[in-house]
Amino acid sequence: MSIEVRNASLPDKEVIASFQEEMALETEGLRLDAVQIRAGIVAVFQDKSKGRYFVAENDGEIIASLLITFEWSDWRNAWVYWIQSVFVKKSFRRQGVYRKMYAHIKALALADKSVGGIRLYVDKTNTNAQKTYSQLGMNGAHYQVFEWMKDF
């Protein structure tokens, strides 16, 4: 397997959307509105302040995607990359795909003095993902995420 990580572009939106639809169904039993998810993905490509998508390819096939968004940390006087919307095709899981994507994001963060770190959130029941993140040197010791979201 030869995994390459690259910036996603607008033509990748259908694959990214299908990944997000599959992830929502798999992890939360939610069926996303197809029009809304695609509009949300396009909005990121049209406004770089919203975030950046990355995809991983194996022999030209997109097998994974993730989104980074940006949070300003006044404590660090730096940006924090938030990794979101991570999806790896089932047949490619547990083969180092996310590890490769994380290494790519971390290299970008290390090369940019305005970036202070990387965060992500994970479902409490997703123990496989938690193990992966721990093995990569991330920890979940500091914060618990609380949220309020409007129903759409």
Image (spheres, rainbow, N blue to C red):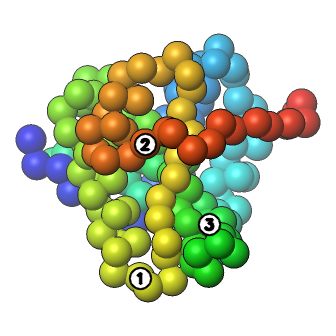
Q: In this view, does 115 lie above or below 133?
A: below
In this rendering, would 10 be left or right of 28?
Answer: left
- Label 2 neighbourhood size at 10 Å, few (<14), some (14-19), many (20+)? some
In terms of sequence position, does the residue under pointer 3 or pointer 1 come before the other? 3
Q: Is residue 120 above or below residue 47?
A: above
- Label 1 neighbourhood size at 10 Å, few (<14), some (14-19), many (20+)? few
Q: How far apart are marks 2 and 3 (CA)?
A: 19 Å
Q: In this view, does 118 lie above or below 137?
A: below
Residue 21: image quadrant is top right
Report whether residue 17 is seen.
Answer: no
Report whether residue 105 is seen.
Answer: yes
In terms of sequence position, does the residue under pointer 2 or pointer 3 come before the other? 3
Label 1 sits on what residue type? Asp
Q: How far apart are marks 2 and 1 (CA)?
A: 22 Å
Which residue position is annotated with label 1? 112
Identify the residue shown where x is 36% and y is 22%: 128
State if disc 1 and disc 2 touch (CB < 8 Å).
no
In this rendering, would 17 be left or right of 118?
Answer: right
Identify the residue shown where x is 18% and y is 32%: 95
Q: Which of 20 and 133 is in front in this view?
A: 133
Q: Which of 74 and 61 is in front in this view?
A: 74
Q: What element carries label 3?
A: strand
Mark closer to the observer (2, 3): 2
Residue 59 in percent (x, y) is at 15, 48
Q: In this view, does 87 lie above or below 103?
A: above
Residue 70, which numbered label? 3
Which residue position is annotated with label 2? 139
In terms of sequence position, does the residue under pointer 2 or pointer 1 come before the other? 1
Label 2 sits on what residue type? Asn
> Quadrant where the C terminus lies?
top right
Label 3 sits on what residue type? Phe
State if disc 1 and disc 3 touch (CB < 8 Å).
no
